[in-house]
Image (cartoon, grey):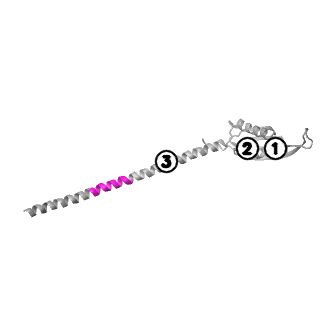
Amino acid sequence: MKNKLTLWLNLILVILLILAVWFGHGEMMKLRTAYQKLNELSGESNQTKAWQNLLENSREERDLIHQSLVTSDSLPDFIDQLEQLATSTRNKLDIASAIPGDKSNPNIRISFSVKGSYNNVLRFTSLIDSLPVQLQLNTASFSREGASEENKSLSLWQARFEIELVNNNLPK
């Protein structure tokens, strides 16, 4: 009888052990699945952050591009820049025309001339080229104006320019 009782107890213990292993394995699989889902969500979160950073960088770059475009609203500021360049290079600036863009050509067209010594006119020309705006030089001409009144050996030069300020009407 004692052997039967031990046998039944052992059999019950083995069955309980099998059930515990089976139940534990099922719970481990659930934990593994939850862990995998958590890793996927973490990866998606990192990807979302990467997209947000890319969008922010794109916004900053778009703002820089917009700053390099001269619109009808910012045209007076650009003309002020030209006047400051002429003054700083000791040239005389004369704006002949400034025509705002229209639907067929959104670019602003400006005609102007500068007068000064040869070196000063060339310095002004190089500074225009280095302005942080998108411009297209349509025509440029240089001519000698004759000797200055103060010093007959010093010739005045005149440079005439026709430029277009590129305005691609980019969305903000």
Q: Which residue is mark 3?
A: 49
Quadrant housing residue 168: top right
User: Tag 1, which secondary structure?
Assistant: helix
Q: Where does the image place residue 118, in percent across and percent down from the top left? A: 84, 45
What amino acid does circle 3 point to? Lys
Q: Where does the image place residue 167, in percent across and percent down from the top left? A: 68, 43
**Side (left or right) of 2 relative to 144:** left
Quarter that holds the C terminus: top right
What amino acid does circle 1 point to? Asn
Q: Where does the image place residue 171, in percent across and percent down from the top left? A: 60, 42
State the residue at coordinates (73%, 44%). Answer: 164
Q: Residue furthest right?
A: 152
Q: Is residue 170 visible?
A: no
Q: Is residue 29 visible?
A: yes
Quarter that holds the N terminus: bottom left
Q: Main secondary structure of the magenta part?
A: helix
Residue 26 sits inside the magenta stretch: yes
What amino acid does circle 2 point to? Glu
Q: Answer with mark 1 or mark 2, whichever residue precedes in sequence.
A: 1
Give the numbered dot on residue 65. none
Closer to the camera in the image, 50 or 103: 50
First to last magenta residue range: 24-36
**Side (left or right) of 54 relative to 3:** right
Give the numbered dot on residue 164. 2
Q: Where does the image place residue 71, in percent across and percent down from the top left? A: 68, 39
Q: In the image, which is nearer the foreground, mark 2 or mark 3?
A: 3
Q: Answer with mark 2 or mark 3, whichever residue precedes in sequence.
A: 3
Q: Which residue is mark 1?
A: 120
